[in-house]
Image (spheres, rainbow, N blue to C red):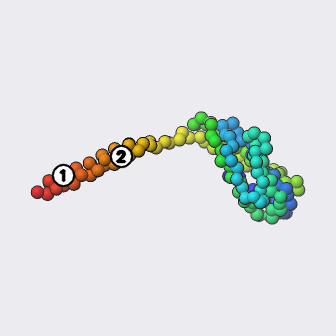
Amino acid sequence: MLTVRNVGQGSAAGPIVVKDTLPAGLSLVSVTAANPPWTCGEMTPGTVTCYHPGPLAPGATAPPINMLVQVTANPGTVIINVGTVTERGDENSSNNSATVPAPIYRPTVAPLLSGWGQVGLAGLLALAGGYGLLYRRERRR
């Protein structure tokens, strides 16, 4: 998710442009943002660009930009993602980017059972439960 906040003293008149060049190991699946005000797309492969017409008042935060990406990097890799924002009247460009490291972990996969596997498991659980009831009845005697 990318979030743009005006930390300056004056209003950002617009247009406000956000660019995120995806690092190696990530590929864009989709990008969504409130439209209006944002218009987003993958203008060149691997680069997401979003336009906001402005204005954005001092201290205000624009609606977030959400990106769904496919991860192709190997587990154990740390991907560094950098997003930048520009606005033609900005007097301080030193605070117009953010860098986020994202470690890639091995996914955990839960075993899935087929329809017959589920029936077999239900039968085993029923037998085990029935055995427990039988065992309790015999001990009470």
Question: Looking at the image, which residue is at 62% across and 40% down?
Answer: 71
Say which mark, if any, is on residue 92.
Answer: none
Residue 92 horizontal side relative to residue 107, left or right: right
Q: Position of residue 15 (x, y in %)?
A: 85, 56
Distance Cα–Cα, label 1 vs label 2: 24 Å
The secondary element bearing badge 2 is classed as helix
Q: Farthest right residue?
A: 89
Q: Position of residue 113 (x, y in %)?
A: 42, 43
- Residue 84 appears in the figure: no
Amino acid of disc 1 = Tyr
The secondary element bearing badge 1 is classed as helix
The image quarter in which residue 92 lies: bottom right
User: Label 2: which residue?
Assistant: 119
Q: Nearer the viewer, residue 89 or 71?
A: 71
User: Label 1: which residue?
Assistant: 135
Q: Farthest top residue?
A: 74
Residue 39 horizontal side relative to residue 13, left or right: left
**46 shown above or below 2:** above
Amino acid of disc 2 = Val
The image quarter in which residue 73 lies: top right
Q: Position of residue 12 (x, y in %)?
A: 84, 60
Q: Nearer the viewer, mark 1 or mark 2?
A: 2
Question: Looking at the image, which residue is at 76% across and 48% down?
Answer: 41
Question: Looking at the image, which residue is at 29% across and 50% down?
Answer: 126
